[in-house]
Amino acid sequence: MENYSNQPYQQQPVSPPKNWLVEAILVTIFCCQIIGIVAIVFAAQVNSKFAAGDYAGAQSASKDAGKWTKIAFFVGIAWVALCLLWIFFWGGLAMMSNRYGY
């Protein structure tokens, strides 16, 4: 008969960590496709690792999915800002050249 009292008891989490899948898909569609795909890959790993009993792996995948989702979001915002600056620069230049007859 084994004595289980000396073995450490580890309570299993009740719910899986946030998987960021919806956010990763939206960021992939609207902001940055390449980084968004990386976020989707990590987000897809969260539930499968949790179901397999790898709680630390699920937590790590959730953290990585959140990180890549946020990076893709801010890269997308920066890209839109740069495009708007580019448009305003060339539009202003065209307006000035048209105004002064260059």
Image (cartoon, rainbow, N blue to C red):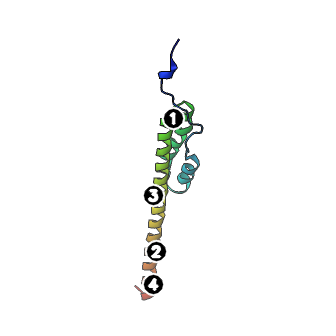
Residue under the point 44% across and 71% down: 85
Q: Decide which of tag 3 and tag 2 comes sooner along the chain.
A: 3
Q: Mark 4 points at which residue?
A: 98
Cα separation between marks 3 and 1: 30 Å
Work out whether 52 lies above or below 64.
above
Residue furthest to the bottom: 100
Mark 2 and 1 residues: CB-CB less than 8 Å, in contact? no
- On-image quarter of the C terminus: bottom left
Q: Decide which of tag 3 and tag 1 comes sooner along the chain.
A: 1
Eye-nearest disc, 2 or 4: 2
Eye-nearest disc, 1 or 4: 1
Residue furthest to the left: 102
Work out whether 83 lies above or below 56.
below
Cα separation between marks 1 and 4: 64 Å
Q: Label 2 crowding class (10 Å Cα cut-off): few <14, some 14-19, many 20+?
A: few
Q: Where is residue 89 in the image (x, y as percent from the top left)?
A: 43, 75
Q: Label 3 crowding class (10 Å Cα cut-off): few <14, some 14-19, many 20+?
A: some
SS for callout 2: helix
Residue under the point 53% across and 51% down: 28
Q: Name the residue under label 3.
A: 75
**Amino acid identity at mark 3:** Val
Q: Please give the label number shown on residue 55.
A: 1
Query: Who is closer to the viewer here, 64 or 38?
Result: 64
Residue furthest to the top: 1
Residue 75 seen anywhere in this rendered image of the structure: yes
